[in-house]
Each structure stands twice: as structure tokens, then as C-alpha cells.
Image (spheres, grey):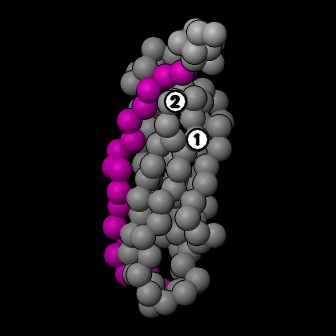
Amino acid sequence: YDTANEKEDKLITTSEVSPIKADLGTLKVGDSKKQLFEVKNTGDKPLVIIATSSTCGCASVEYPKQPIPPGGIATVEVTMNPKDVGFFNEIIQLKCNTEYPAKLRIRGRAE
């Protein structure tokens, strides 16, 4: 059983995200604020964002559904809409055809 060949069959590639973290500052509960992240395909196969997840229900993520070619850059838009007063420090995961999910961190304070 050869796991190296299995990975090649699945078209595993690599990516970089910029910025890795963002500070949204202070926003009011119920208001929303957008943050853009760039995802660069640093591998030699098309990069596909398959799904996203977050540590809270206060984040929505828009991402390109089409593959990102090698060397290509795409924009991921995260909208935070805090529901409670206080600090937030959330992690958004981008599940891609990479070995590990890409992680974005968004923090700020809701008042």
C-alpha cells in the first residue's frame, strides 16, 4: 500500500494566506465588518477551496468556487457579525486540496 501515490492521485497542492490574522478593532453588536484575505496557490496543481468552517456562528465566508491555478491568487471575504458584547478571537478554516486546512484568525471587540 503506497500512500505517496494516493496523495498524488488526490492532486495535493500548497497554499499561502495573507494576512494570516486581522484585527477588526471595535464594532457594535449587530453591525458587520468585512475582511479580505488573499489565498495564493504556491503549488503546481490547481488549488480548490472545498469548504469553510469557523469557531463561531458570527462569521460568514465567501470564497471562489473555481480552482485557483498554480501561482494564482484569489480573494476570500470574511464578514464578522458579533452577536454578544466582548472580545472575539475566531479561527476560520479553509478546507482545500492541501495537506492541512488553511487557518485565518480574526479578532476584535464588540460593544
Where is the C terminus found, in terms of image quarters? bottom left
Label disc, if present, on residue 95 of the rendered structure? 1
In the picture of the structure, the residue carrying the numbered disc 2 is 98
What is the secondary structure assignment of the residue under circle 2? Answer: loop
Dominant SS type (magenta) = strand
What is the secondary structure assignment of the residue under circle 1? Answer: strand
At 52% from the left and 16% from the top, the residue drawn is 45
Disc 1 residue type (three-letter):
Lys
Q: Is residue 7 above or below residue 38?
A: above
Q: Position of residue 103 (x, y in %)?
A: 45, 49
Decide if residue 25 is on the left or right side of residue 36. Answer: left
Label disc, if present, on residue 30 of the rendered structure? none
Q: Disc 2 and disc 1: Cα gap in Å?
A: 8 Å
Magenta stretch bounds: 12-28
At 42% from the left and 70% from the top, the residue drawn is 89
Q: Is residue 47 above or below residue 59?
A: above
Q: Position of residue 77 (x, y in %)?
A: 52, 53
Residue 19, can we see it? Answer: yes
Where is the N terminus found, in terms of image quarters? top right
- Is residue 14 highlighted in magenta? yes
Q: For mark 1, does the 10 Å Cα neighbourhood hold few (<14), some (14 to 19), or many (20 or more) residues?
A: some
Q: In this view of the protein, which residue sits in the foreground, 67 or 94?
A: 94
Q: Where is residue 39 in the image (x, y as percent from the top left)?
A: 44, 38
Disc 2 residue type (three-letter):
Thr
Decide if residue 18 is on the left or right side of residue 8. Answer: left
The quadrant holding residue 5 is top right
